[in-house]
Amino acid sequence: MGTYVNPGNQAFKRISGSNYVDKTALIELFNDRIGGDESLICLSRPRRFGKSYAAKMLTAYYDCSCDSHKLFDDKIIAESESYEEHINNYNVICLDISGFISYAKREQIPLTDIPSRIAKAVKEEVLVLDSDAPIDKSLEDCMLHYIDQKDGKPFIFIIDEWDAMIREAKDDEKAQTVYLNMLRGWFKNNNFTPKAVAAAYMTGILPIKKDGSQSAISEFDESSMLDTLEFGNFVGFTEEEVKQRCKGTRVGFEEIKAWYDGYDLPSVGSVYNPYSVMKALKSGKCQSYWRKTSAAESLKNYINMDFEGLQQTVARLISGEKIPVNVDLFQNDFETFTSADDVLTLLIHLGYLTYHEEEKTVQIPNEEVRIEFKQFLSQNGINNTWVRLIKRSQKLLEDTLNEDGEAVAAAMTEIRGEQYAPQYYNNEQSLRSIIKYAYLTAVGQCIKIEEMPSGKGIADVVFIPTSLSRLPAMVIELKWNKTSGGAITQIKEKGYIDILKPYKGNILLVGINYNAKTGEHECSIDKA
């Protein structure tokens, strides 16, 4: 199936050309941990965030079967004091768990057999290094024999897609248990002595599966989208890295930022999806490059379960809201869901949401992901209420642009009757609460600001188009038991559009009034 012990540096050589974004500072952090009490590391990141690139990089750097100086001498790691001490100075056991699963599926091998096949494949290759090692001994004994008798170097484990078994065998508890037992046997309680294994590095989408409230393999330090530890710079692309990549391309940085920025890491700042950024720069076009995966496809099923009104929560997320979430109870798998918080936490790990640690809230990170959520709500199998919401919001926005006040008022009245309207509809605040649903499709194309100080007062809702949007700006004034025409007059007399003076495009003035006696809305639209 492959070479698992000392596979060389060719895989990294293929990706380290002119388009490579230098992430080799990760090696220095790893060097500092080798042989110590914190030498076991698990980094979980969404798909297309560079996990496999990092695994290839570490393999090429540590593998003693090759000379990788030409690949690293011009990289950041070469400036480190630890560079020469560790380069090409270890035996590397490199495993891609997804490859074993693909092979098992092709050959119709039960998933429960995969762990034993992994252990057997590694042991056979260690025995190739040391043909005198006793074949009836454990993998660790064979490794120690090689080190002691053949003057071998200690081993480093690099395991890519460690959680592939957890994801692919999500309905096969036995297969998961056998696999986790293999990893426990290797790493729990330091079963591999430091003399045999200097360090281990695992990557995956999910953090290590929990056994109750604790990690099933607690010896690993875990860097995830919830807590990156000191590895935050190695989550996707930083803003400075994106700026450098944009130079000399057809796509401007501001356009890239509007589409792909938004992951919130306190120690780093803005973080971008590397795959989407590179695709946009190569094609010269910003759009959604999100790729459907088995993990992503299953989200439709989770959302359709509608835990605790989850579909309404998704609609609120699309509208730009931040939603409180408890991330502590998620079991780090794809089958143990007991609440909406569990699903939202999964979406953080998958890259569909960004987590604000201090606020303990989530929101949609950028326009690319917002498009994916809208598509989820528009697919068959999702509650028709939310499909209607998306379609009605698009129609309402078009009616606003066409200055059709009657159509906008009628749509507002329809929205008032749906389940996402507030239970007590009796003041301007409750009227404002349905604006976010009415203009759902404007979010992402515009920045929405509520209660914006301007002129001689405060504008209720202002939509300011992004640099990429073709929409006009909109100033919306809300009234209760008054008139929509009076709302337009107030916008003009109090100078609410003053705040938009730097904006050079068209500006629409929208007045919306609710008549509590008739239960009807009215809308007037004018241009500034």
Image (tube, grey):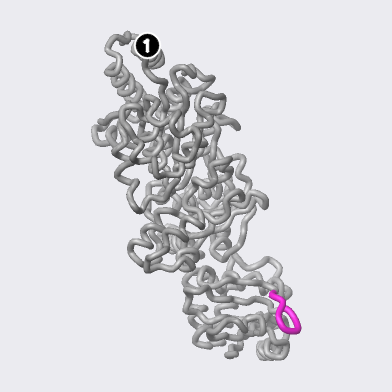
How many discs appear? 1
User: What SS does tag 1 mark?
Assistant: helix
Q: Is residue 178 above or below residue 457?
A: above
Give the position of the N terminus as an image quadrant.
top left
Which is nearer the eye, 101 or 221? 221
Side (left or right) of 59 relative to 383: left
Q: Quadrant of residue 144?
A: top left
299 magenta-colored: no
Residue at horizontal 41 percent and vertical 28 percent from the top: 157
**Residue in the picture at 35% in, 66% down:** 284
**Start-end of magenta stretch:** 452-458
Q: In the rendered view, does 325 fall on the left or right side of 129?
A: right
Give the percent coordinates (x, y) of residue 343.
53, 48
**Percent from the top left, x then y, of residue 121?**
30, 23
Q: Position of residue 205 (x, y in %)?
A: 46, 42
Disc 1: which residue: 145
In front of the other: 41 or 304: 41
Circle 1 Cα neighbour tier, 10 Å, few/some/many (<14 / 14–19 / ≥20): many
Magenta residues: mostly which secondary structure?
A: strand
Residue 216: tell me if it is visible: no
Name the foreground residue: 395 vs 194: 194
Q: Is residue 456 magenta?
A: yes
The answer to whether residue 13 is seen in the rendering is: yes
Q: Residue at x 68, y 86 (%)?
A: 491
What residue lies at 58% left-to-right and 54% top-to-bottom?
269
Quarter of the image with the C terminus is bottom right
The x, y position of residue 131, in whole percent, is 27, 12
Q: Amino acid at mark 1?
A: His
User: Compared with residue 430, is residue 523 higher up or lower down, i.e. above or below?
Assistant: below
